[in-house]
């Protein structure tokens, strides 16, 4: 089995870090939108195949953590846990993850197996690529849309740009929360196994 089974996700296999992160979001303490620079670590461990009847998926077991610049020795201000999936028969790439604030989402999009750039999105209320939140967040900071663009370079570098749109109780207009970073592969770990349980 080769990394080709993972289609456009093959270039993400490994352990990554990036110190060029920029988070632009609403800061509750200040009551306004502000920037936060961050350092990030992420791992993508390959697994598969996973059989869903006639559907066959290859995936990446995914974990990430981000620290504000200068706070790398403290608790991360953001973490994610989930899977990235590739459905070759339908040219679908997916990102399924949860954050410890009580939010989960499945974003997806169409891509070719050889693609080095692709996008995924999710919308509130959709039954396939959708978003769920806990009761408090649904009432106070309801996420309505998520978009993610990935670009994989050939020299062990990838970058991402995400936009999360949400309705905050302190704002009459939707808030655009953006995150972007450029990541460098630290190690290449092609682990062909079942996902972590």
Image (spheres, grey):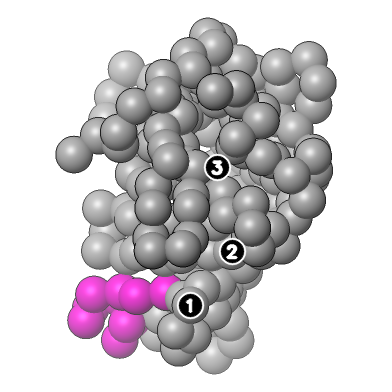
Bounds of the magenta span? 131-141
Question: CA–CA distance between discs 1 and 2?
Answer: 9 Å
Q: Quadrant of residue 46?
A: top left
- Across and down, in percent, residue 181 comes to 65, 36
Could you say where residue 81 lies in the image, as x and y percent from the top left?
34, 44
Dot 3: element: strand
Q: From the viewer's perspective, tell me whether residue 29 is left or right of residue 94.
A: left
Is the Cβ of the residue at disc 1 closer than 8 Å to that at disc 2?
yes
Camera-side residue of 44 and 33: 44
Disc with the residue nearer the chain's start (1 vs 2)? 2
Which residue is located at x 53 percent, y 9 percent? 187
Q: Earlier in the sequence, mark 2 or mark 3?
A: 3
Instruction: Determine which residue is flagged by label 3.
Output: 36
Label 3 environment density (alpha carbons within 10 Å; few <14, some 14–19, many ≥20):
some
The residue beneath circle 2 is: 108
Query: Residue visible at 78% across and 51% down?
Result: 112
Q: Secondary structure at mark 2?
A: strand
Crowd tier of the residue under label 2, counting other residues whose Cα lies within 10 Å: few below 14, some 14–19, many 20 or above: many
Q: On the image, numbered disc 1 is attached to which residue?
A: 128
Is 115 or 152 nearer to us in this picture? 115
Q: State the quadrant of the C terminus.
A: top left
Q: Is residue 68 visible?
A: no
Q: Earlier in the sequence, mark 1 or mark 3?
A: 3
Q: Is residue 135 magenta?
A: yes
């Amino acid at each position: 089995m080769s990394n080709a089974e993972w289609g456009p996700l093959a270039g993400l296999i490994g352990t990554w870090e990036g110190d060029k992160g920029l988070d632009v979001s609403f800061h509750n303490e200040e009551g306004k939108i502000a920037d936060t620079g961050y350092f990030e670590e992420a791992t993508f461990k390959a697994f598969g195949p996973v059989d869903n009847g006639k559907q066959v998926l290859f995936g990446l077991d995914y974990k990430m953590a981000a620290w504000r610049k200068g706070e790398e020795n403290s608790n991360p201000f953001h973490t994610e846990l989930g899977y990235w999936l590739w459905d070759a028969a339908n040219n679908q790439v997916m990102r399924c993850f949860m954050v410890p604030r009580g939010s989960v989402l499945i974003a997806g999009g169409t891509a070719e197996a050889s693609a080095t750039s692709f996008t995924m999105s999710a919308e509130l209320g959709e039954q396939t690529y959708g978003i769920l939140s806990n009761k408090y967040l649904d009432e106070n900071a309801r996420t309505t849309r998520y978009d993610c663009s990935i670009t994989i370079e050939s020299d062990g570098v990838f970058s991402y740009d995400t936009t999360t749109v949400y309705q905050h109780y302190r704002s009459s207009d939707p808030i655009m929360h953006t995150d972007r970073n450029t990541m460098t592969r630290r190690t290449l770990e092609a682990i062909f196994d079942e996902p972590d349980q």
